[in-house]
Amino acid sequence: MTRIMQAVVMLLLGGAVIKSTLTDTFLRYVKEGLRPFLLGAGLLLVTAAIMTIWYDLRAARGDRAPHDHTPHDHNPHDDTPHDDAPHDDGHGHGRHELRVGWLLLAPVMALLLLSPPALGSFAAGQSGSIGPAEASDYPPLPAGDPVQVGLLDYAGRAVFDGGKSLAGRTVKLTGFITPGPDGAPMLARMTLACCAADGRPIKIGLTGAPIDAPPDAWVDIVGVYSSEVGTDPVNQAQLAYVDVKSWQEIEEPTQPYE
């Protein structure tokens, strides 16, 4: 692959990284805190590509300038290739290599034009739920009902705090629907340590008002603490439950991961 071709691929890749960072598409891949690093990497790629293209075009213009060539005899028996000869093995492989090189643009163009969905119910069903973190003391929930609570925070308060900090409170949980082991719907949300490759689900069982939303549908659930505790068959983690009072289907949030 020529250096110009490499620079074009690098330019498009850098542009794709910048575009996904500025449009929040990157949140489907990595955590929000990595935004400045991704933006810096994209700008660096674009800058390096532009400098490479400019340098090569400038060098090409210099090569086309008139030169004072010293005459020399040509030896018809000299088969040594000159620097300006095309790099080919006689079977057209050099030309084929150039054409195949442009196929490297395919994944870059896909990144520019396509926006893959965030991890959903399939990934949640294949992975065991994150066990709620045990804490010695859970602070009181903020004032106001219903109060927005993260799934991992709710699970910890329900399982390890015995629902003490949830008593008398109405909570609002946001996540997507995933089928449970018995086929009943559960509420889930993926959590990331760094990027989508290490995504793990946190799952919450549902009692109370029935929910008929399809898998992967995002919902807001308003409910109260339930003392029921289940077990995730994938990894035997404890699963908290919430007693659903009402729910509504919503659009996928800009930040799909917790």
Image (cartoon, rainbow, N blue to C red):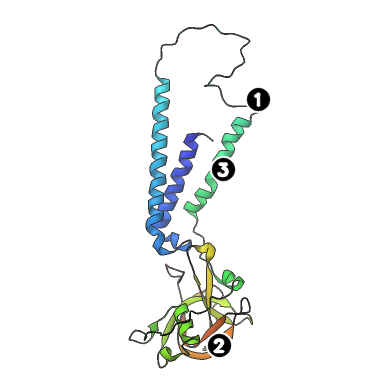
Q: Which residue is mark 2?
A: 229
Residue at position x 51%, y 34% in the image: 2
Q: Quadrant of the N terminus?
A: top right
- Disc 2 vs disc 3: which is toward the camera? 2
Residue at position x 56%, y 39% in the image: 101
Label 2 neighbour load within 10 Å: few <14, some 14-19, many 20+: some
Classify 250 as above or below 81.
below
How far is the residue under mark 2 from the one under mark 3? 52 Å
Q: Secondary structure at mark 2?
A: strand
User: Sequence-wise, which precedes: disc 1 or disc 3?
Assistant: 1
Name the residue type under label 2. Val
The percent coordinates of residue 228 (x first, y second) are 54, 90
- Disc 1 vs disc 3: which is toward the camera? 1
Residue nearer the viewer, 86 or 116: 86
Residue nearer the viewer, 40 or 11: 40
User: Sequence-wise, which precedes: disc 2 or disc 3?
Assistant: 3
Could one spot residue 174 in this view of the protein? yes
Residue nearer the viewer, 105 or 41: 41
User: Sequence-wise, which precedes: disc 1 or disc 2?
Assistant: 1
Q: Which mark is residue 90?
A: 1
Q: Which residue is mark 3?
A: 103
Name the residue type under label 3. Leu
Q: Secondary structure at mark 1?
A: loop
